[in-house]
């Protein structure tokens, strides 16, 4: 059975057949019950009307004698020759006043309430009503019955009234079937929706995710398996690319070290400085390539609770010598108490270092780069450079993108690394120009949960100024 229901089509057909079968069983039962109720109702009304007609001809004399004189039409209706309708009139003393059969139709116990009655009379089944009526201050029980074998004449009345009463059930049944169909298709397509949600989570940094094949219909499973195989090949290609990048960067370090050593033998100081600058650029490119490869390896590294203030302070202290060497100032400002965030310390260290290094390279000598920590869980790197045009604020994060701002010897990889790390932390990255010029890079981390406690301090905590 499970094998037969492995495809989407077979599941839908099977479930739909089940729904129709249940409806086919349920609807006739409901219709039969409604038909039976309508038949009984019509029969009772008919018998009650005949009892009322008989009472009209019941008379009580001054001596208290009760007599029943029916007109010819009613006599014919209740005649033995017609044999369809029967009646009996009984007084309060249980004496028979009149009867078409010469005897009461139903039991004459006065304690028995009036209403519908049913008896066996020979081979016939007599059904009718027993009605109590008051005539001249006396109470009489009028019994009227019908031979059920002659109820065909009620067919027209039954059909007419029945369909008027049951027509209202058509719309609810159609709505019920529609609801059942929606549920059926929803259950049948649930595995496909799950696979779709899983596919949405797959990206360049999450190529290790695979679509679940459990409960996938057999006619769709080949497609899901083909997607998983394509992801396997893609992940293998990314892994080979990362390994090649890391191996190439490692292999180039030794030749560059040898070249740097041989520069000491060049007599022309100007040529030597130019070659040293070129080697520095190549070394930085190799370091960034290695960093990209290492970040790919760290993409599944666990997050932990960190102190953003302490992390920023450590970065500023580590990069202080570079700022002094470049004749710039590097300052840590903002919130001085503990600011809690979730993150990977190694990855964030690299992101902050790349942003600060980028700011130092685009800030004029004698100016300052500010690292500002906010109590809301964000950090800003503020430089005093030329700023960034609005149309370039997304382009600068692309690998190897270069323009005027990136013509200072960089390879265009540093900000790409920053974007990768920020995305891995599900943080926000915003770029804007300051009111007095310069660029402001802001990273906003998701809240940890509990609010940060402490007193905000806008005092400058660290200021490292270059010597003039």
Image (cartoon, rainbow, N blue to C red):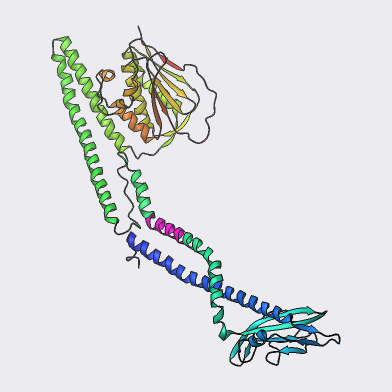
State the image quarter where residue 100 is shown. bottom right
Q: Start and end of the magenta stretch?
A: 177-189
Q: Residue at x 74, y 82 (%)?
A: 57
**Nearest to the observer: residue 30 or residue 81:** 81
Q: Position of residue 62 (x, y in %)?
A: 86, 85
Left or right of 16 on screen, residue 231: left
| Relative height, residue 74 to residue 326 (above, below) | below
Left or right of 237 on screen, residue 440: right
**Nearest to the observer: residue 432 or residue 326:** 432
Q: Position of residue 122 (x, y in %)?
A: 61, 93
Magenta portion: prevailing SS class: helix
Left or right of 82 on screen, residue 175: left
Outermost residue, top side: 468
Give the quarter of the figure containing the C terminus.
top left
Q: Is residue 346 visible?
A: no
Does 184 lie within the magenta span? yes
């Amino acid at each position: 059975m499970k094998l037969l229901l492995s495809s989407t089509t077979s599941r839908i057909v099977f479930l739909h057949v089940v729904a129709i079968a249940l409806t086919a069983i349920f609807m006739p039962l409901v219709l039969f019950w409604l038909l039976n109720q309508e038949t009984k109702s019509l029969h009772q009304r008919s018998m009650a009307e005949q009892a009322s007609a008989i009472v009209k001809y019941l008379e009580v004399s001054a001596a208290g004698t009760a007599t029943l004189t029916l007109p010819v039409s009613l006599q014919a209706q209740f005649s033995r020759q017609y044999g369809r309708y029967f009646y009996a009139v009984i007084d309060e003393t249980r004496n028979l006043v009149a009867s078409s059969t010469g005897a009461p139709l139903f039991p004459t116990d006065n304690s028995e309430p009036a209403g519908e009655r049913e008896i066996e009379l020979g081979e016939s089944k007599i059904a009718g009503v027993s009605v109590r009526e008051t005539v001249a201050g006396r109470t009489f029980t009028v019994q009227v019955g019908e031979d059920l074998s002659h109820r065909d004449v009620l067919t027209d009345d039954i059909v007419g009234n029945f369909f008027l009463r049951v027509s209202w059930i058509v719309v609810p049944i159609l709505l019920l079937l529609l609801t059942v169909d929606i549920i059926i298709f929803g259950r049948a397509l649930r595995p496909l929706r799950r696979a779709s949600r899983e596919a949405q989570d797959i990206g360049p940094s999450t190529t290790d995710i695979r679509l679940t094949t459990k409960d996938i219909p057999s006619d769709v499973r080949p497609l899901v398996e083909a997607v998983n195989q394509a992801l396997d090949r893609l992940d293998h290609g990314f892994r080979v690319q990362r390994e090649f990048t890391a191996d190439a960067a490692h292999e180039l370090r030794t030749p560059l070290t040898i070249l740097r050593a041989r520069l000491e033998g060049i007599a022309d100081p100007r040529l030597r400085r130019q070659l040293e600058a070129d080697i520095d650029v190549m070394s930085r490119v190799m370091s960034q390539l290695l960093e990209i490869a290492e970040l790919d390896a760290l993409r599944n590294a666990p997050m932990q609770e960190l102190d953003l203030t302490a992390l920023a302070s450590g970065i500023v202290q580590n990069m202080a010598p570079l700022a002094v060497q470049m004749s710039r100032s590097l300052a840590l400002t903002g919130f001085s108490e503990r600011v809690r965030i979730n993150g990977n310390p190694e990855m964030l260290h690299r992101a902050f270092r790349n942003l600060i290094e980028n700011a130092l390279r685009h800030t004029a000598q004698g100016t300052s780069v500010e690292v500002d920590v906010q109590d809301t869980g964000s950090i800003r790197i503020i430089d005093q450079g030329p700023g960034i045009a609005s149309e370039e604020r997304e382009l600068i994060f692309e690998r190897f993108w270069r323009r005027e701002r990136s013509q200072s010897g960089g390879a265009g990889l540093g900000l790409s690394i920053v974007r990768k790390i920020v995305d891995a932390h599900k943080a926000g990255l915003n770029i804007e120009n300051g009111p007095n010029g310069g660029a402001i890079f802001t990273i906003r981390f998701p809240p940890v949960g509990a609010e940060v406690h402490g007193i905000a301090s806008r005092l400058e905590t660290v200021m490292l100024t270059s010597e003039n």
